[in-house]
Amino acid sequence: MSTEPAKKPSVLFVCVHNAGRSQMAAAFLTTLAKGAIEVRSAGSQPADTVNPAAVEAMAELGIDMSAEIPKVLTTEAVKESDVVITMGCGDTCPIFPGKRYEDWELEDPAGQGVDAVRPIRDEIKGRIEGLIASLTPAQ
């Protein structure tokens, strides 16, 4: 039996702008997994800044995303991730064999106020809780 610590599972969240859905998902996973899962997020066409309504909606739950910056999607990020979760980026996400892919159909919070972002945020949180349960052994 190996005494090496098990490699942490890694998850990459991808949406077009990496400014709303993927940032909220990454923030939830980082917070709720408490370091048990490596988290990345990126966009196929990253925006200049993270959506302020998404930042505000997450702050209501005590999660600070104000320092996050949208990042460009790279093939390296996909290769280094065990699970790739796409959110409306369609065919722009590279596909590699042996990866687990999920496509989460979520409304795009771009251009919407915080009232419209809250239900999207809450749906993402529920999906993240299910994702954590599927990636980490029961305690």
Image (cartoon, grey):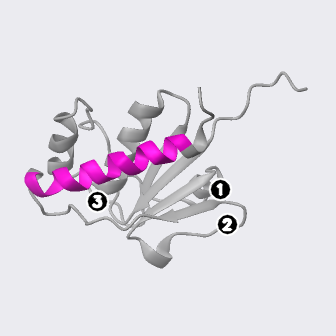
Amino acid found under the numbered disc labelled 3: Ala
Could you tell me if the residues under marks 3 and 2 are in contact, i.e. CB atoms within 8 Å? no
Q: Callout 1: few (<14), some (14-19), or many (20+) C-alpha neighbours within 10 Å?
A: some
Q: Is residue 55 shown above or below 99?
A: above
**Quadrant where the image shows the C terminus:** top right
The amino acid type found where label 1 is placed reads: Lys
As helix, strand or loop, the secondary structure at mark 2 comes to loop
In the picture as drawn, the residue positioned furthest to the bottom comes out as 91
* 119 horizontally vs 90: left or right: left
* Residue contact between numbered discs 3 and 1, judged by CB atoms under 8 Å: no
Residue named by callout 3: 47
Of all residues, the one furthest to the front in this rendering is 138
SS at badge 3: loop
Q: Which residue is mark 1?
A: 79
Span colored in magenta: 115-133
28 drawn magenta: no
Q: Where residue 126 sits in the image (x, y, percent)? A: 36, 48
